């Protein structure tokens, strides 16, 4: 059972003896109930892809009593043989003064840093920044800071030369600091294992200047030999008119589609929808649309016959559209 306090509920390291392995519970769903026992939310569970580190689970730093409450997601992709981490993130609820306040000389101000600790429940175990002190005498994390604009902070492909591999930093925690350097949030980080595709990291489409800001997560589980993808998602911040507006004949309206591109930084490289045009002449993505209700949109097990395997669509980008068909998030 969960217990709500100040509008949120959290817990860490709860062991449930199911008699099943993680592989056996992968691709099942988690149901959240209200106080009457009614089912109120459904969360798809999947196994990530190998290599990178992912986290979308953020809790307040143990003992923190301030009014900041961070939400969002972080990813660390493997840099290569030089043992660095490449960090991308999008968060809301951080210190609004980060990016404008003069924090010169303030240790850890507005920082986003991997720490020594391996759980968020005990402040005494979290320790300091985590890096290979044998290779590097200077702390590589001191320069890693977030800047808040319009209520959120985001960055892509920030390289931190820690002297450590992703395997070595897996299961550590990321600490987010305010402008005074105080620790405000703690985020466990874990490494993905082979299987489906997962994304918890959403940024605005390059060049998009509208007022929509999508947050949430998407997962693609393997369909099998017929080379389809099974999409599950839960997002907030999409177009509120999706689901009620008449979008007949509007290309890509309210769409969630895998595109040809492999990164979200350059609109010119993102291209069109990605599928096997040799197998299928018709675009299988045109019918994939989200519907917003009460501020969020979700769906489970939407099958898209792309003619491609999960390996072939891995490292592509998903584009989210508004009701006009415009690209709003990547």
Image (spheres, helix red, strand yellow):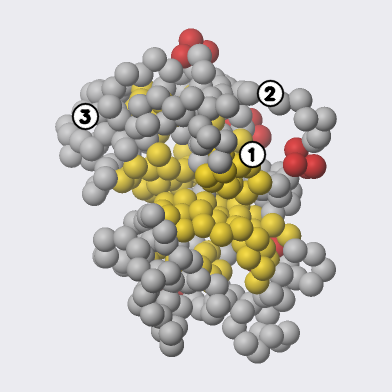
Front position in the image: 233 or 262 = 233
Q: Earlier in the sequence, mark 3 or mark 1?
A: 3
Helix, strand or loop for disc 1: strand
Cα separation between marks 2 and 3: 41 Å
| Quadrant holding the N terminus | top right
**Residue 162 visible to the viewer:** no
Q: Which residue is mark 3?
A: 103
Which is more foreground, mark 1 or mark 2?
2
Left or right of 289 in this view: 82:
right
Looking at the image, which residue is at 65% across and 71% down?
304
Percent position of residue 312, x then y: 69, 67
Q: Quadrant of residue 249?
A: bottom left
Cα separation between marks 3 and 1: 33 Å
- Residue 191 image label: 1
Which is more foreground, mark 2 or mark 3?
2
- Residue 18 image label: none
Percent position of residue 69, x then y: 34, 32
Would you say the residues marked 2 and 3 are in contact, meaning their CB atoms lie under 8 Å apart?
Answer: no
Q: Earlier in the sequence, mark 2 or mark 3?
A: 2
Q: Earlier in the sequence, mark 1 or mark 2?
A: 2
Q: Which residue is mark 2?
A: 15
**Residue 177 visible to the viewer:** yes
Front position in the image: 31 or 159 = 31
Front position in the image: 140 or 201 = 201
């Amino acid at each position: 059972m969960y217990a709500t306090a100040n509008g949120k509920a959290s817990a860490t390291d709860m062991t449930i003896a199911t008699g099943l392995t993680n592989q056996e519970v992968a691709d099942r769903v988690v149901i959240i109930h209200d106080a009457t026992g009614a089912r109120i939310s459904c969360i798809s569970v999947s196994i990530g892809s190998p290599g990178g580190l992912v986290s979308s689970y953020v809790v307040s730093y143990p003992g923190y009593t301030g009014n900041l409450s961070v939400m969002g997601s972080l990813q660390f992709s493997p840099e290569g043989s030089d043992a660095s981490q490449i960090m991308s993130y999008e968060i809301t609820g951080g210190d609004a003064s980060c990016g404008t306040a003069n924090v010169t000389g303030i240790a850890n101000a507005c920082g986003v840093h991997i720490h020594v600790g391996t759980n968020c429940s005990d402040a005494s175990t979290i320790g300091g920044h985590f890096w290979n002190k044998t290779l590097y005498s200077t702390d590589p994390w001191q320069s890693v800071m977030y800047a808040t604009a319009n209520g959120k902070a985001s960055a892509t492909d920030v390289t931190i030369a820690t002297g450590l591999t992703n395997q070595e930093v897996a299961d550590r925690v990321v600490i987010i600091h305010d402008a005074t350097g105080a620790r405000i949030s703690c985020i466990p980080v874990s490494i993905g294992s082979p299987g489906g595709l997962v994304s918890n990291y959403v940024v605005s489409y390059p060049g998009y200047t509208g007022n929509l800001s999508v947050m949430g997560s998407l997962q693609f589980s393997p369909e099998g030999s017929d080379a389809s993808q099974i999409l599950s998602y839960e997002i907030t911040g999409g177009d509120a008119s999706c689901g009620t507006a008449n979008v007949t004949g509007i290309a890509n309206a309210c769409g969630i589609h895998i595109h040809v591109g492999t990164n979200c930084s350059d609109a010119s490289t993102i291209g069109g929808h990605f599928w096997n045009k040799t197998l299928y002449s018709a675009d299988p993505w045109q019918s994939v649309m989200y519907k917003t209700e009460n501020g969020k949109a979700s769906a489970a097990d939407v099958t898209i016959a792309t003619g491609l395997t999960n390996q072939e669509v891995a490292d592509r980008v998903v584009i989210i559209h508004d009701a006009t068909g415009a690209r709003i998030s990547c």
